[in-house]
Image (tube, rainbow, N blue to C red):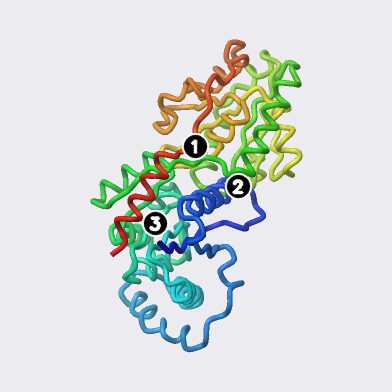
């Protein structure tokens, strides 16, 4: 079976959750289909061999038709015509039996259309269900309604979807489309780093008084969750508990205006070494997620690193995970309580082998 995988962020130097998910998919699909998987990263798509001019021209009528039908914007049309030929060329060169396309917002969502209409069994692996993401503004579409309709059509037209969360999978099934839940689990190189952090945390047995808020704030659900958390922090309770909150991650510097206390530090983007030291020295990871998505990768990473996770609010994707050191709290001040600060992980999340088998079976059913 020949599989062509289009991961969204594989090869990106930014080590955010999207990159980790892409790397997981590359590792898992290659392991399930050894020697028969071609990988073309969307992040490096235009670094591939440039299509001939005729291949660009061939997309012009369809792209213009989509604009006239009100389905995509003029900006989206230009992106469609520029990126689309690279997708078609990769498919033609690979000659796959199955295509797996990791769908991210903006132009990847656009050119996914060329995959689902290729007459080859195609599985979409959505980074998020984009139409549920708060404040998701996509210039490639004339309106939020048009973007939603486009995404729904893709999910329905695909052979199936491979979703990062059970929530996302349930949403796709509500659209009368097929979906499986293939949860995030760190790729091997990340697992090795997290195991070292876990070992260092056990070795450095000093009292930990820092709560870490880490994530990619350019992701709208993550940013909104961080904003809500920072606005709800009780600085007096922090001071009384002799605790501090440190916020770090790509784009978090944009949240600096929300903070007016020496007990809360906004670091913004940090080096791998600094993030490693923060994870070793913190007493827990504090998150305030939106219901839709965001923070999925942080839950698994923290578990393997031996870091307790305090989840603020009624987050369905953190249900029944207390045994793995993932604790739901009603207010940020609960994370400051001594009994919670000494909480340790008692079980490790396991690699989704069964789900990988299910994904393989689903893929196999798509071959004609």
Indicate left or right for 133 with 300 as reference. left
Whether the residues at callouts 2 and 3 have beta carbons within 8 Å, the answer is no
Q: Nearer the viewer, residue 227 or 274?
A: 274
Residues 168 and 100: in front is: 100
Q: Quadrant of residue 70 in the image?
A: bottom left
Q: Position of residue 227 (x, y in %)?
A: 55, 37
Q: Position of residue 296 (x, y in %)?
A: 50, 39
Point out residue 152 in the picture as x, y percentages from the top left corner.
31, 57
Q: Is residue 202 above or below residue 186?
A: above
| Crowdedness near tag 1: few (<14), some (14–19) or many (≥20) residues, C-alpha within 10 Å | few
Pointer 2 or 3: first along the chain: 2
Depth-wise, is mark 2 or mark 1 nearer the camera? 1
Task: Relative to 78, say whether 17 is above or below.
Answer: above
Q: Secondary structure at mark 3?
A: strand
The structure residue drawn at horizontal position 33% and vertical position 63%, both measured from the top left corner, is 121
Residue 301 seen? yes
- Which residue is painted at 52% across and 40% down in the image? 185
User: Which badge, 3 or 1, comes first in the chain's sequence?
Assistant: 3
Q: CA distance from mark 3 to mark 1?
A: 21 Å
Please tell me the numbered disc located at residue 124: 3
Q: Distance between the Cα atoms at labels 2 and 3?
A: 20 Å
Q: Quadrant of the C terminus?
A: bottom left
| Residue for point 40% across, 41% down | 355
Callout 2: 10 Å neighbours few (<14), some, many (20+)? some
Which residue lies at the image location 35% right of the left edge and 59% below the top edge? 151
Residue count near mark 3 (Cα–Cα under 10 Å), binned few <14, some 14–19, many ≥20: many
Say whether residue 75 is visible.
no
Asked which secondary structure carries label 2, the reply is loop
Q: Which residue is mark 2?
A: 16
Residue 351: assigned label? 1
Asked if the residue under mark 1 is in contact with the one under mark 2, i.e. CB atoms within 8 Å, the reply is: no
């Amino acid at each position: 079976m020949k599989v062509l995988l289009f991961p969204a962020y594989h090869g990106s130097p930014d080590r955010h959750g999207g990159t980790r998910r892409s790397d997981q998919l590359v590792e898992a699909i290659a392991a399930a289909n050894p020697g028969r998987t071609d990988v073309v990263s969307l992040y490096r798509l235009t670094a591939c061999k440039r299509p001939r001019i005729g291949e660009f021209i061939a997309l012009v009528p369809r792209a213009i038709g989509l604009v006239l039908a009100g389905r995509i914007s003029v900006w989206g049309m230009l992106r469609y015509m520029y990126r689309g030929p690279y997708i078609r060329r990769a498919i033609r060169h690979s000659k796959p039996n199955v295509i797996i396309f990791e769908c991210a917002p903006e132009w990847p969502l656009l050119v996914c259309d060329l995959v689902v209409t290729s007459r080859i069994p195609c599985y979409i692996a959505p980074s998020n269900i984009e139409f549920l993401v708060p404040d998701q503004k996509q210039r490639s579409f004339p309106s939020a309604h048009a973007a939603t309709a486009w995404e729904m059509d893709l999910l329905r037209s695909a052979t199936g979807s491979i979703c990062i969360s059970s929530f996302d999978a349930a949403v796709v099934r509500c659209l009368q489309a097929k979906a499986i839940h293939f949860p995030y689990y760190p790729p091997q190189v990340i697992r090795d780093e997290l195991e070292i952090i876990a070992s260092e945390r056990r070795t450095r047995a000093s009292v930990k008084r820092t709560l870490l808020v880490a994530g990619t704030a350019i992701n709208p659900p993550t940013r909104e969750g961080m904003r809500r958390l920072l606005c709800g922090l009780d600085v007096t309770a922090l001071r009384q508990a002799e605790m501090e909150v440190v916020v770090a991650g790509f784009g978090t510097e944009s949240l600096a205006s929300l903070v007016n206390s020496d007990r809360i530090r906004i670091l913004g983007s940090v080096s791998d070494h600094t993030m490693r030291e923060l994870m070793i020295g913190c007493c827990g990871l504090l998150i305030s997620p939106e219901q839709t998505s965001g923070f999925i990768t942080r839950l698994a990473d923290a578990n393997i690193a031996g870091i307790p996770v305090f989840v603020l609010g009624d987050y369905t994707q953190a249900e029944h995970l207390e045994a793995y050191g993932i604790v739901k709290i009603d207010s940020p001040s609960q994370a400051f309580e001594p009994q919670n600060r000494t909480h340790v992980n008692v079980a490790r999340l396991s690699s989704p082998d069964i789900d990988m088998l299910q994904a393989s079976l689903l893929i196999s059913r798509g071959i004609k």
